[in-house]
Image (tube, rainbow, N blue to C red):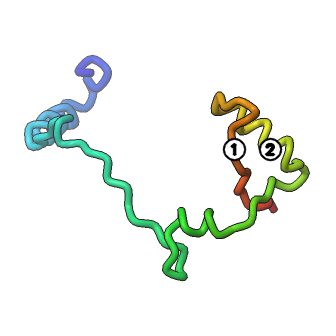
Amino acid sequence: MRRLFAEHPDAMAETERFASLIHFSLDELKYNYPNETIGNGETAQQTLERLPGRAPAGVTPTECLTGSRRAYGMNSSSSSRCDTPPIS
């Protein structure tokens, strides 16, 4: 990096100073998914469960179900629904 930024020694010094101020460990990371609502008090999951099963525009429900089963390694006897809203 020093070779690449030889014309900007102050930039390298500032980068080193800034990096010395950062104290971070990967152990500090955790999954923190926010609570979702769509504005009417329902969670995203509740909304999906309430909507009727629909395939995207131009795709039959059978095609959608077959593709979902294939994608998730489900056999044909598994129950699944395609609950995606139409694509506009």
* Residue 86 image-quadrant placement: bottom right
Please identify the residue farthest to the bottom as the structure is shown: 40
The residue tagged with tag 1: helix, strand or loop?
Answer: loop
Q: Write the residue at 69% across / 68% down.
A: 51
What label does residue 62 carry, if any? Answer: none
> Which is more toward the observer, 54 or 23?
54
Q: State the image coordinates of residue 87 (x, y, percent, origin top left).
A: 79, 58
Residue occupied by mark 1: 79
What amino acid is found at the position of numbered circle 2 in the picture? Cys
What amino acid is found at the position of numbered circle 1 in the picture? Ser
> Which is more toward the observer, 14 or 88?
88
Q: Write the residue at 80% across / 44% down.
A: 64
Q: Residues within 10 Å of mark 1 (few under 14, many from 20)?
A: few
Residue occupied by mark 2: 64
Q: State the image coordinates of residue 46 (x, y, percent, origin top left).
A: 55, 68
Q: In the rendered image, which quarter contains the N terminus?
A: top left
